[in-house]
Amino acid sequence: MRLSASSLALLALLALLAVLPLSAARADDPCAAFSWDVHHERELFGKDAVDLASGKALADAPALTPDHLYELELRAQPEISFALPPSRTWPAEATYGGMARITVAAAGVYRFALDQGAWVDVVVNGAMLKSRSFQGRPGCSAPHKIVEFELPADRPAILEFSASVTPSLKVTVTRAPVQ
């Protein structure tokens, strides 16, 4: 079957019209700009958060479980006895922080998604883990920032949150999809 030039032009126009609403929706949603697949994290940020007080020290740091949304009540950073000093310093107005802990059963890459531009460090066996990668999206808070770390199985990890400008922080921990 051979199509005329006008039929081809009509098909091209229809294809363009079908794609335009999707492009406009992505432009209107800053959270859609992540280059990673963040459907799971976005789904979790759409649920009710579990409220927890963050720890001032490891002894009172709450345990987090993957695949839940938490809202951590943060503390003034000078009150916190971090296991290791935060790996980054921030402006004077970023004065809130806190600690939590997690132990995962399976080793692998895990994502820490935050609703704001706060800092997250992970300490295992007294050493700061280096993040594998991160992404953030201005204008998006569900989540705003995602940082990936390689976590070992069955070893406690200390999560150190710092440099928040607000006294609370929403956070999820998820296993990164296998690429």
Image: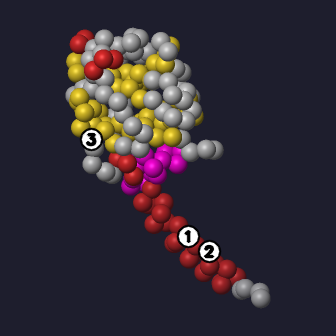
- Look at 45% across and 29% down and name the residue there: 103
For the image shown, how many numbered marks are present on the structure?
A: 3
Residue range (magenta): 27-42
Out of 52 and 28, give the one closest to the viewer: 52
**Quick check: can you spot residue 134?**
no
Q: CA distance from mark 1 to mark 2?
A: 6 Å
Q: Residue furthest bottom?
A: 1
Q: In the rendered structure, which amino acid carries the disc numbered 3?
A: Val
Q: Which of the two labelled residues, at mark 1 and mark 3, occupies the earlier sequence position? A: 1
Out of 61 and 146, give the one closest to the viewer: 61
Instruction: Indicate whether 5 appears above or below 137.
Output: below
Q: Quarter of the image containing the C terminus? A: top right
Residue position marked by numbered label 3 in the rendering: 50
Q: Position of residue 33 (x, y in %)?
A: 47, 47
Q: Residue furthest right?
A: 1
Q: Position of residue 46 (x, y in %)?
A: 33, 51
Whether tag 1 and tag 3 are in contact, CB under 8 A, the answer is: no
- Look at 23% across and 29% down and name the residue there: 53
Q: CA distance from mark 1 to mark 3?
A: 43 Å
The crowding category of the residue bearing disc 1, from other C-alpha atoms within 10 Å (few below 14, some 14 to 19, many at least 20), is: few
Q: In the rendered structure, which amino acid carries the disc numbered 1?
A: Leu
Residue position marked by numbered label 2 in the rendering: 12
The crowding category of the residue bearing disc 3, from other C-alpha atoms within 10 Å (few below 14, some 14 to 19, many at least 20), is: few
Secondary element at image label 2: helix
* Model colouring: secondary structure
